[in-house]
Image (cartoon, helix red, strand yellow):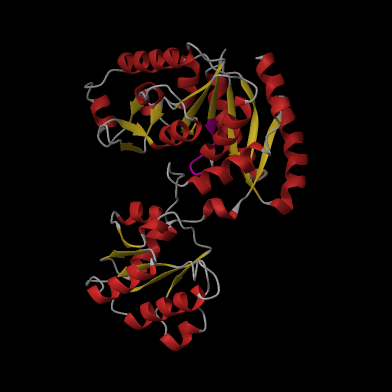
Amino acid sequence: MRGLFIASTGQHIGKTTACLGLFSGLHKLFSPLGYMKPIGQQHITTKQGIQVDKDVLVFKKHFGLTDSLESMSPILIPAGFTRDFLDKKIHIDDLRKKMITSFKTIQENKQLVLVEGTGHCGVGSIIHLNNAQVAKELKLPLILISSGGLGSSFDDLTLNITLCNQYKLSILGVILNRVLPEKQEMIQHYMRKALKRWNLPLLGCIPFDPFLSTFSMGDFELLFQTPIITGSNYRFRHFDRIRLVATSVESYREMILPNQLIITPSNREDIILATLNKHLELLDIHKEGLCAGMILTGDFAPRHYLIEQLAKADIPVLYTPLHSYTAMQKISAFTAKISTEDTDKIKEALSIAESHIDFSLLQSALNGS
């Protein structure tokens, strides 16, 4: 076996969070431990010009993995890839060979390789490499990560397990993620009962962590495709709340709170200066000040004298020519992914996931597979 495939039952389930916890815990049981993500969708280009899946970079950097990026992220699906595949410009045999060769390269000197899938089990079907097919090609048992509910989660599990059974895959168990703490005991109890239908263990029940859902200015740089103009030292500052400000400055002054991201038009200099003054006032009390961030919007960039003052105060600020309401809509529809540089979020994800996975039960399942 010497490998373990991780798939989720849907998009934005928190599979990478679970994988961070799994990798950290498994590393204590199997060393050396490898990691790869055979099929990647969201990718970036490194300084060396290598295109690689974002999650692969997170694991390589945080855990100090020595395998090549090309082996850890062998296949990427950029825009146009599916059309090229259907036009027979890309051949499935070549993709399979590349994936299997990469897996064997990583597997050579490892006790175990953690293989992270992409989305739910059916993702990739159009190129004949969905998660179930990939696990089958690599001859790996599988763990399913599902959202932290009961009825809806079980429905999602049913769909994904049906596909896994079609390929005769060995499923070792289920991990629930983002379980509401007040429902955790109840969900654990009843999900264990429900999973007896397939004779599957509940390997983990990871609670919802609000911090993992917060955004940083780095996330907004990615979303709006524009760099921070001031306060880059705080690119990975996270915010407890986001507020679109269109009220009078008098009303706004009464509502200024720490750890708040403000969205306001760039010509609302009264709001910008009120935020700046509150920050400077709080600096006398503690060194972090207001811990604010700002997204300035509208047709005209903020005036130079304002940028200078914001830069002196080291407040992270981003400008987009979108209008405030449109910017807020984009944020509302956005799901931030864990990035390599966001070490606070990586540590939080790793800690909460690892501490809520039953590794004794997982080891027993692995030994029996």
Which SS does the magenta portion mostly show? loop
The C terminus lies in which quarter of the figure?
top right
Q: In this rendering, does residue 248 appear at all?
A: no
Q: In this rendering, does residue 161 appear at all?
A: yes
Query: How far across and how far down the image is residue 93, in percent?
Result: 32, 13
Q: Residue at x 23, y 73 (%)?
A: 304
The magenta-colored residue range is 7-13
Query: How far across and how far down the image is residue 163, in percent?
Result: 53, 26
Between 134 and 257, the residue placed more toward the observer is 257
Q: Residue at x 33, y 29 (%)?
A: 76
Q: Give the residue furthest to the bottom.
A: 250
Is the residue 288 above or below the residue 225 in the image? below
Horizontal side of 172 relative to 230 (left or right) equals: right
Is the residue 158 above or below the residue 346 in the image? above
Query: How far across and how far down the image is residue 59, in percent?
Result: 47, 33
Between 215 and 96, the residue placed more toward the observer is 215
Q: Residue at x 42, y 32 (%)?
A: 56
In terms of image quadrants, where is residue 210?
Answer: bottom right
Is the residue 67 above or below the residue 154 in the image? above
- For the image shown, how many numbered marks are present on the structure? 0
Query: How far across and how far down the image is residue 184, in percent?
Result: 73, 47
In terms of image quadrants, where is residue 36?
Answer: top left
Horizontal side of 104 relative to 178 (left or right) equals: left
Is residue 63 rendered magenta in the image? Answer: no
The N terminus lies in which quarter of the figure?
top right
Horizontal side of 179 relative to 218 (left or right) equals: right
Between 199 and 333, the residue placed more toward the observer is 333
